[in-house]
Amino acid sequence: MTIPAEERGMATMTHLSGLAGYLVPGLGVIAPIIIWVLKKDSPAISKIAKQALFLNIAVFLIGILGFLLLLTVILIPLSFLLWFAAGLVAVILPIIGAVKAGDGTLYEYPLIGSWV
């Protein structure tokens, strides 16, 4: 699926909206919801917003799982590994998506893209 030229800027911003949570806590979830509500009529923007939302929720849940693993002494290394991997994925996937959106290609996040 290609993204129309007039929607490429919004598609790029939608991918990067999840990263806003690093600047203002909670904004990584709120921004994709707002974009999704405002741009429901655009299939591409709607799909990207849902992907960004689900990615941030998944990273949040992985963070909670990492914290719970931290409470067990033996699984502390696994906890840090989960946090590192989730943080890396949460930064890299939106950047790849934003670059592809700028080129007009709809990028689906691995695992999440097929669900939404």
Image: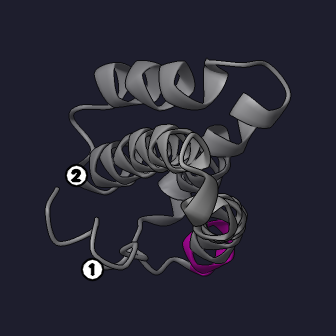
The correct choice, above or below, for 109 with respect to 41 in the image is: below
Query: Local crowd at mark 2 within 10 Å, few (<14), some, or many (≥20)?
Result: few
Estimate the x, y position of residue 103 in percent, counting from the top left.
61, 81
Q: Which residue is drawn at 59% across and 69% down?
A: 78
Which color scheme does this rendered protein use?
Answer: one colour
Q: What stretch is highlighted in magenta?
A: 98-103
Amino acid type of the residue that numbered disc 1 sits on in the rendered structure: Met
Based on the picture, tell me whether residue 82 belongs to the magenta stretch: no
Amino acid type of the residue that numbered disc 2 sits on in the rendered structure: Pro
**Quadrant of res 90:** bottom right
Estimate the x, y position of residue 86 in percent, counting from the top left.
59, 62
Estimate the x, y position of residue 110 in percent, counting from the top left.
36, 79
Label located before the other in sequence (2 or 1): 1
Q: Most prominent secondary structure in the magenta stretch?
A: helix
- Which residue is label 2 attached to? 43
For the residues labelled 2 and 1, say whether their Cβ atoms are less than 8 Å apart.
yes
Q: Residue at x 45, y 28 (%)?
A: 35
Q: Residue at x 41, y 39 (%)?
A: 57
Q: Is mark 1 on a helix, strand or loop?
A: loop
